[in-house]
Image (cartoon, rainbow, N blue to C red):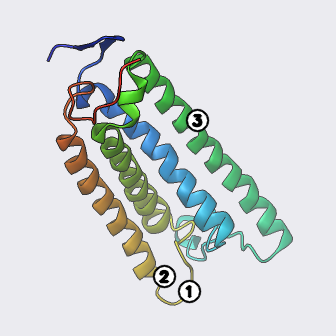
Amino acid sequence: MAAVGTRAGRVGEGTRGIGVPATVLGIGLGGFVDGILLHQVLQWHHMLTSTDTDNIGLRTYPADTVPGLRMNTLWDGVFHTFTWLAVLVGLGLLYSRVTSSRGRLWGSRALWGWMLVGWGLFNLVEGIVDHHILGIHHVRTGPGQTWWDLAFLALGAVLIVAGLALARRGGRIGDGAAGRRPTR
């Protein structure tokens, strides 16, 4: 597929050109939603609050003790550092691919679709690894915790399917399918 030309300059290929950067950006943003909403605002869990880690030899750090909260705050910070770096890398990759048509890029279905794919991938990987394999925390501990964990995975799958559908409908950046904006 050839690059698309615009008055402002040349833009990278269509959805393939922004798929990886937007997916990485979506992973970071999905991690921020998880960390800010579930860890901090709702305080449903932290990185190491689960009680079923004995089967893999990990120590439990309950959030209702000062040492447990200190350790969870540290690992929540490590988690947020990872999500912040993913956002920076995603933005850097995106910028390197599309430097002359940023206005059209932010309005494109392809970008937002791939970001949803990244968010969904974050949910699936984090949910499978942390909630089910390692058991270091759950979405919401207590009665029905398995259903919360499964709902988190289902949300990830829905985000991926919706994101792929949106990205496929997005067309190439700058070809009009991304939404017309005046060229400066």
Identify residue for label 2.
145
> Residue 41 appears in which quarter of the rendering?
bottom right
Query: Residue 177 or 88: which is nearer the viewer?
Result: 177
Tag in front: 3 or 2 = 3
Q: Residues within 10 Å of mark 1 (few under 14, many from 20)?
A: few
First in sequence: mark 3 vs mark 1: 3
Residue at the image point whose x is 46% and y is 39% from the top: 25
Query: Residue 89 or 62: which is nearer the viewer?
Result: 89
> For the residues marked 2 and 1, what is the alpha-carbon distance in whole angstroms?
5 Å
Mark 1: amino acid: Gly
What secondary structure is marked by label 1? loop
What secondary structure is marked by label 3? helix
Residue 143's x, y, as percent? 51, 90
Please determine whether, in this image, residue 144 is positioned above or below residue 8.
below
Residue at the image point whose x is 36% and y is 50% from the top: 116
Identify residue for label 1.
142
Residue 181's x, y, as percent? 34, 30
Is the residue under label 1 in contact with that under label 2 (CB below 8 Å)? yes
Mark linked to residue 85: 3
Mark 3: amino acid: Leu
Residue at the image point whose x is 53% and y is 65% from the top: 56
> For the residues marked 3 and 2, what is the alpha-carbon distance in whole angstroms?
30 Å
* Relative to 21, 180 lies left or right: left
Q: Give the quarter of the figure containing the C terminus.
A: top left
